[in-house]
Image: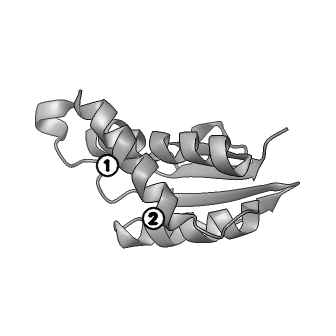
Amino acid sequence: MIRRLLHDLGYAIAYVLFVGANTPESIVKRLRVAYRLVGVRIVEMPQVDSVERTIFLCPYRNLGVTWFGEMWICHDILDRVDDGYVTYLRRHKGINYQRPRGCADLAYCDESEYCYSEVSELE
């Protein structure tokens, strides 16, 4: 139930956060502002082909590890809010937002503590 509420919160925030933004470039600018507002440190902002990528370090990685497991805040709480963004952007803007995930699967991102997200137009 809490996860659903967090998703719905993200969906509601998305209406305000993305008003007037209709391109991957404008969407990713607003996402980066939102990331910074919650204390995320952005490390790199490359554009790969037509995909806007943001590489960052989540300051909450180890918060609650003792009780809830590794990266609980980043990957269980904040990701549910991001899921609301994903739903909104896909449904209303035709934008594919790949919410944050571990950086280990990127060839040039060898720092395992980093995460990345991607924004592009729906295919």
- How many marks the image carries: the answer is 2
Residue 74 on image: x %, y %: 35, 45
Rendered image: mark on residue 61? 1
User: What crowding class fits label 2: few (fewer than 14 Cα within 10 Å), some (14-19), or many (20 or more)?
Assistant: some
Q: Secondary structure at mark 2?
A: helix
User: Residue 123 placed where, x, y %?
Assistant: 85, 38
- Residue at the far right: name it: 49
Q: Nearer the viewer, residue 7 or 65?
A: 7
8 on left or right of 117: left
Q: Is residue 57 left or right of residue 77?
A: right
- Tell me the amino acid under the disc marked 2: Tyr
> x%, y% of residue 92?
65, 48
Quarter of the rendering occupied by the N terminus: top left
Q: Residue at x 50, y 73 (%)?
A: 33
Determine crowd level at label 1: few under 14, some 14-19, many 20+ residues with C-alpha closer than 10 A: some
Measuring 60% from the left and 50% from the top, which residue is drawn there? Answer: 117
Q: Which residue is mark 2?
A: 35
State which quadrant residue 28 falls in. Answer: bottom right
Q: Picture coordinates of residue 26 (x, y %)?
A: 69, 69
Q: Which amino acid type corresponds to the residue marked 1 in the rendered image?
A: Arg
The residues bearing labels 1 and 2 have C-alpha atoms spaced at a distance of 14 Å
The front one of 4 and 38 is 4
Foreground label between 1 and 2: 2
